[in-house]
Amino acid sequence: KFPLLVFFQGYTSLMTQNTILLEELASHGYVVLSIGVPRETVTEYPDGRITGVFPDIAAELAKKDGLLTKNLLNKLKRRKKLSLAELDNFTRLLYVPNKNEVNPKMTEYNNFVHGRMKVWYQDLLFVLDHLDDLALFAHKLAADRVGVLGMSMGGGLASCAAYYADPRIAA
């Protein structure tokens, strides 16, 4: 059976954004699936349709992200030093925050990201559940030991996949 890797790109990104990396992995014998998340990434369907990021999703992300990073970006533009607390606050994006320590806007952003991660994780499980629907690879994939990787939010999803410990996900 062929070793399988499932790749998720970054939030609002293109499925083809990391083609060179995925081609390199494929050249070493892996079957690599690049997964688009409908509404949240630029997605190409088997029938050739392409959909972009839905405006409501883009607006929600811009609102949450804008509130979070406005102060940080202003300081960077003015070349002012960030305090250790500000840097620490900014780097907690994928962790459950202690609400006594974290800026409320950070918590709002975290909640948004965590909500999206749950959707992406369900999409990953859907893909794993339907691997045999891929006629070309039906029963030819090592679907019991899959690797998950990604860029940006897709990398966060890979961490979540390891955390939730679905027995099919090996790396």
Image: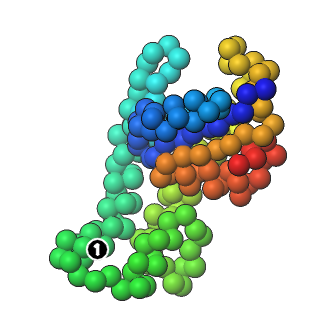
The location of residue 141, given as percent across then percent down, is 75, 27
**Could you tell me which residue is drawn at 58 percent across and 68 percent down?**
95
Q: In the image shown, does 144 or 51 lie closer to the viewer?
A: 144
Residue at 45% from the left image edge and 33% from the top image edge = 19
Picture coordinates of residue 124 (x, y %)?
65, 39
Compared with residue 77, is residue 44 higher up or lower down, i.e. above or below? above
Residue 120: x percent and y percent? Answer: 59, 44
* Horizontal side of residue 17 vs 150, given as left or right: left
Reply above or below: 104 against 119: below
Residue 37 can be seen, yes or no: no
**Looking at the rendering, in which quadrant would you find the N terminus?**
top right
Tell me the kind of residue under disc 1.
Asn
Describe residue 42's horizontal placement relative to residue 76 as left or right.
Answer: right
User: Residue at 20% of width from left, 77% of height from top?
Assistant: 79
**Could you say whether the residue bearing mark 1 is in a helix, strand or loop?**
helix
Q: Which residue is mark 1?
A: 71
